[in-house]
Structure formats: C-alpha cells, structure tokens
C-alpha cells in the first residue's frame, strides 16, 4: 500500500530534507498552530520510551490534534498474542497518523505495508530512528547555517549507536567529512565504512580523543560507551575514561563547533561542559519537538505554505 | 564410463536438473519433497561431469517446475541447469538463476527481525556481486552460502 509513512529518512533527497527543515524552523517560531484540529494521532509504544513519546505527544497537542495510544504493551492485546498487523489494522480505524515504537527491527516498515494510515517510525529496535535523525539534522543546520561540507566528529560507541549510523547515511548528499573516534571494540561497522566509500564520503578513523584531535570539528557528536557492550571487561576499564569530553579539551575548538548528544548522558560529557558556548545537547532535545511537528505535518500532506498561512 | 547417457535413465516427459553440486543434492531432494512424488524419480550423485569432477542429477517424470520453485533451488546452488523434456526431446534448456528478490524463501538470521516474530512473508533483495541477501525489513545481510531456508 502506497502512503506517506516515514520509516527512514536515510534516502531522502536534499529537497525533501530542506522542506522538513524549513517546516521545523517555522514551528520553532511558533509551535502552537492548531492546523490539525479534528485529527487523531495514535502513539503506539510497544516498547516504553518516555522521552520520545512525550516529544511526539507534545508535538501533536501543540498542533491541535487529539492523542490516543498506549505507553506499555503489557496493557494491550499484544500481551494476549495479538499480531502487530491486527493491532495496526484496528488502530487504523481510529487514527489519522500512527506514531509507533517497537523493539523488533523492521516493525515500522511492515506496519506501513499493512495500512493506508501513515506510520511514523519512532524507533524500531536498534534499526532506525528517523525522528532523532531529523532533529539532529535540524540542530546541525540551525547551528551551522548549512549542512554542506561540514567536519562531523562522532565519538564513543560507533558500533551499536543507531543515531550515528542514521546520521551518517542522511548526511550523504552534503559532502561531509567524518571522523570516527572510538575504542577498537566499538568502531564504526564495516557496512557503514563501505557506504562511505561507495558514496565518495571522506572519513578518518582514530582512537585518540584529545583537544588536538577535535580541533577542526564543526560538530562533535558524543555517544555513550556502555559497559555491557564489551566482551572484554579489561578493555572496558582501559577505555572507559578515554572518551569523556571535558571542558579543558575545548580550548582549541572552532568557534562554531557545537556538541550534540542523543541523551541521556551518563558521564561521557563532564558537567562543566554544560556551561560552554559549544554545548548544544539540551537545545538539541528541544529541537526534537519542532522536527516532530514537521514530520507529523509532512505525512499528512502539509507543505510549508500550509503552515505559514 | 564409456557411455555417459547410460548413467541415468531416459525421460519421456518431465524435468531434469543437472550440474548439482554433490554435497547439495540431498538438500534439493528435501526441498523438492521428492519423497511425496508418485511418478518415477531418478536421483544420481557422484556422476562424472565435464564442468566439474563430480555432479548430481535429478530427473522427475511428469513434473514441470514453476519459476518460484526454481528460485528456491537457486538459493542453495546457483549454477544448476534445467532441461524440460517432452516426448523424449529436450524442448527447453536454461540456467537456474537467482532472482533479484526472494519472497518467503529465506529465513532472516536476525532474531529480533519482525519476520521472525510475526506470521508474515520474508522478502530478501539479492546482491549477486557481493554474494549476499539483504532483509527488506531489518536490513541485515547474510552471505548466500550461509542462509537458512524458511
């Protein structure tokens, strides 16, 4: 079934991304636009995620839509053995848009194939999380004034971090130069390095994380190095403090450099960095609201001019 | 052997799958569910071959395979030949090629893929150059030699 679902934005063209960025910017000027009055947005969280759910529900509420849904699959028929298809079919009778999060990979794509109601993927396992990618792109665009020709440094867990993988793929049309800074055990998977090679994207891999190695960054995208990801705990003990960003490492950075983080952070960004002009992770989370407003409007067929009128 | 034609019996009507790797023959026999056939079936293995040192062959009377059935076989051994026989004559001869998309043939190796947890078809896109298949749903790839059939 053909519909305007957003399962991934990795293959979006520059024009499609620009349209979404412009809409997000418009919502930032005024998030309270009741253009979805009379519409119903369903938020189906088969896997709990308070942060993402609140952001989507706030986005829908500020657009004037009603929100239905569940926050925990234990209270739904899924726990009685109902298939995903049946749940989606049932909710499709009620809602104009379905925002869904699921622990299984590919769940959102499958859901989009069984209904005509647009699906927005709010995360499917460790696979895709396009609304996070959209807010990352918006944050980069907003702070740098462009997405073109940027030095993007990705730090920490590059093996399992789906946000860095999605961002990497979405930046492909904009001629980025990537620096992958990680311990050996958590380095960028081969398939993404191959993607870079195929698309002619420059990348540099390194293990040193110092003031010198990040001096040329426009964007420093931090991620958490988690203990449970290591097979060798000795290795974890050796590297756990090597990928912590401290304020004294920012002395040589470019003025325009901004630090992003998908949050929640644990200790990978020291608290004294929060007061630096480079810190941007809390505003980044706020940008999620505008990005999600743009995504909801986009799947319902709204264009920029429909919002500004 | 002097007369190669004597290795297996001639067929009046049906299909011959030739050039089967010897270690794959019985997998194919299972996949085709030849044990359920009532018409004559001839299975030969370790036969001499011009192309490779040994080969397997399956001859099935009265059976003409569909493209769908053949694409399943191609996943297991991609370089086989099919001959269609009518009235003792070969009326069609072709390679059994791997299609670009495999629908409900392969099982995804990713335990947290939706296809392993929902009653649904699998879809895999075939990349012959890289020798891999990629799950349409979860995006995970598997090398063709290591895949499990559904």
Image (tube, helix red, strand yellow):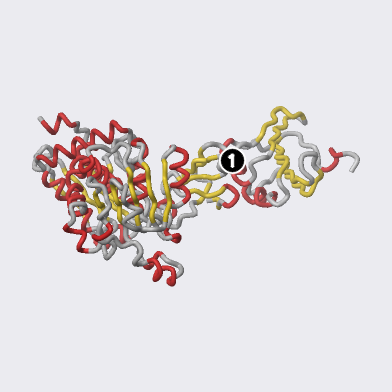
Residue A72 is situated, as x and y percent measured from the top left of the image, at 25, 60
Residue A140, quarter of the rendered image: top left
Residue A175 is situated, as x and y percent measured from the top left of the image, at 36, 37
A17 or A201, nearer to the observer: A201
Q: Residues within 10 Å of mark 1 (few under 14, many from 20)?
A: few
Residue at 29%, 62% in the rendered image: A268
Vertical comparison of A63 with B13: above or below: below
**Is residue B104 left or right of A242 when viewed as pictured?**
right
Pointer 1 residue: B69
Residue A40, quarter of the rendered image: top left
| SS category of the residue bearing label 1 | helix
Vertical comparison of A290 with A51: above or below: above
Residue at 27%, 65% in the rendered image: A267
**Is residue B24 left or right of A277 when viewed as pictured?**
right
Q: Chain of mark 1?
A: B
Residue A306 is situated, as x and y percent measured from the top left of the image, at 14, 30
Residue most toward the right? B2
């Amino acid at each position: 079934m053909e519909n305007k679902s957003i399962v991934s934005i990795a293959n979006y063209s520059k024009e499609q991304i620009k349209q979404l960025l412009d809409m997000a910017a418009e919502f930032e000027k005024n998030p309270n636009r009741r253009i979805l009055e009379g519409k119903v947005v369903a938020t189906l969280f088969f896997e709990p995620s308070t942060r993402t759910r609140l952001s989507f529900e706030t986005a829908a509420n500020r657009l004037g839509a009603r929100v239905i849904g569940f926050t925990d699959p234990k209270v739904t028929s899924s726990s009685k053995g109902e298939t995903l298809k049946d749940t989606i079919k049932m909710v499709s009778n009620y809602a104009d848009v379905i925002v869904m999060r699921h622990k299984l990979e590919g769940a959102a794509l499958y859901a989009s194939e069984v209904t005509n109601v647009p699906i927005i993927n709010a995360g499917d396992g460790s696979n895709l999380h396009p609304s996070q990618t959209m807010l990352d792109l918006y944050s980069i665009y907003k702070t740098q004034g462009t997405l073109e020709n940027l030095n993007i440094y990705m730090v920490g867990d590059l093996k399992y971090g789906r946000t860095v993988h999605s961002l990497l793929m979405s930046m492909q049309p904009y001629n980025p130069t990537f620096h992958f800074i990680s311990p050996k055990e958590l380095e960028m998977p081969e398939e993404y390095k191959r993607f870079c090679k195929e698309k002619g994207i420059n990348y540099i891999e390194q293990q040193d994380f110092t003031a010198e190695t990040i001096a040329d960054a426009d964007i420093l995208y931090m991620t958490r190095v988690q203990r449970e990801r290591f097979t060798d705990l000795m290795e974890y003990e050796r590297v756990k403090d090597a990928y912590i960003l401290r304020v004294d490492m920012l002395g040589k950075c470019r003025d325009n450099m901004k630090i992003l983080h998908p949050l929640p952070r644990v200790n990978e960004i020291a608290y004294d960095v929060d007061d630096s002009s480079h810190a941007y992770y809390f505003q980044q989370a706020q940008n999620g609201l505008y990005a999600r407003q743009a995504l909801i409007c986009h799947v319902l067929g709204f264009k920029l001019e429909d919002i500004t009128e | 052997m002097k007369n190669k034609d004597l290795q297996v019996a001639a067929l009046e009507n049906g299909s011959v799958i030739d050039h089967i790797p010897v270690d794959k023959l019985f997998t194919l026999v299972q996949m085709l569910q030849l044990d359920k056939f009532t018409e004559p079936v001839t299975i030969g293995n370790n036969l001499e071959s011009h192309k490779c040192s040994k080969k397997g062959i399956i001859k099935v009377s009265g059976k003409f395979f569909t493209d769908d059935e053949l694409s399943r076989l191609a996943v297991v051994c991609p370089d086989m030949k099919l001959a269609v026989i009518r009235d003792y004559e070969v009326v069609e001869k072709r390679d059994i090629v791997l299609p670009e998309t495999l629908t409900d043939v392969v099982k995804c190796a990713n335990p947290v893929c939706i296809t392993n947890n929902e009653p649904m078809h699998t879809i895999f896109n075939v990349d012959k150059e890289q020798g891999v298949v990629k799950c349409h749903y979860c995006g995970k790839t598997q090398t063709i030699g290591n895949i499990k059939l559904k």
